[in-house]
Amino acid sequence: MSTHNQALVDALRATLGDRAMSVDEALGEVTLVVAAGNLRDVMTMLRDYESFRFEQLMDLCGVDYSTYGGGTRVGLRFAVVYHLLSLAHNRRLRVRVYCAQDDFPVVDSVLDVWPSANWFEREAFDLFGIVFDGHNDLRRLLTDYGFIGHPFRKDFPISGNVEMRYDPDQQRVIYQPVTIEPREIVPRIVREQHYADSEGFRKG
């Protein structure tokens, strides 16, 4: 571990105490895991404390761990991952929080901590169905108004649930159940030994 990262790890452990479920460093990056109930307090500390000063939220994304490790993983299904940047200390930090319930994943919004969280949280809500409590305008961002489900969940059907088309009789766009039969397409693999003969000419 570099001296730079070690100093951050030490500061996180000393300052956050029990609020930090774990602090690890791997591949040159530091990851902090916090419980959902401590998220807002920890994020505010990471922004305001002189030893941290993570002024910018660079990214926020949802994660569905339901098929992680071939489905052998034990633990909560949904998580939110935050990527923070400190310009003052030239540091980056990843923060992970797991949603306490799989059937209705909820975490606190950090919109009032970093305004840049606005569309990030809306995107995670749209694609994963993660609710950000306290967000003042939590609407879908990328999918259509009549969209059903959350397309980045691992159990979302590839063909979707609803299709949209123009109905000439009604003279408007309508929504209907998907008419495409779900199927798996296995790509044809052309291996070199079957592609050309020993002189390099393609076999007919």
Image (cartoon, rainbow, N blue to C red):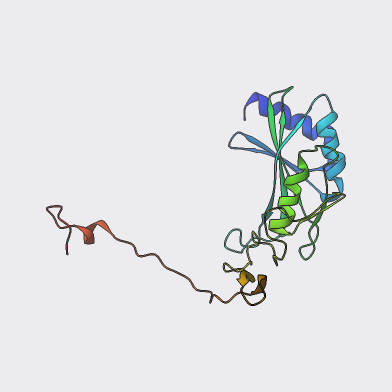
Depicted 103 relative to depicted 61: above or below: below
Left or right for 157, reference 80 = left
The total number of labels drawn is 0
- As drawn, which residue projects farthest toward the left? 199
Task: Pinpoint residue 15: horizontal percent, then vertical percent.
Answer: 84, 32
On-image quarter of the C terminus:
bottom left
Q: Position of residue 53 (x, y in %)?
A: 79, 27
Residue for point 86% across, 39% down: 112
What is the x, y in percent for residue 96?
73, 46
- Identity of the residue drawn at 67% across and 25% down: 4
Dividing the picture into quadrants, the one containing residue 166 is: bottom right
Instruction: Report which quarter residue 83 is drawn in.
Output: top right
Vertical placement of residue 187 versus 86, above or below:
below
Which residue does the image show at 80% across and 37% down from the upper left? 114
List x then y, in percent, for residue 144.
68, 60
Residue nearer the viewer, 30 or 167: 167
The front one of 65 and 199 is 199
Q: Is residue 126 above or below residue 180?
A: above
Question: Residue 67, relative to residue 167: is it above or below?
Answer: above
Query: Which residue is at the front of the view, 36 or 204?
Result: 204
Q: Quadrant of the N terminus?
A: top right
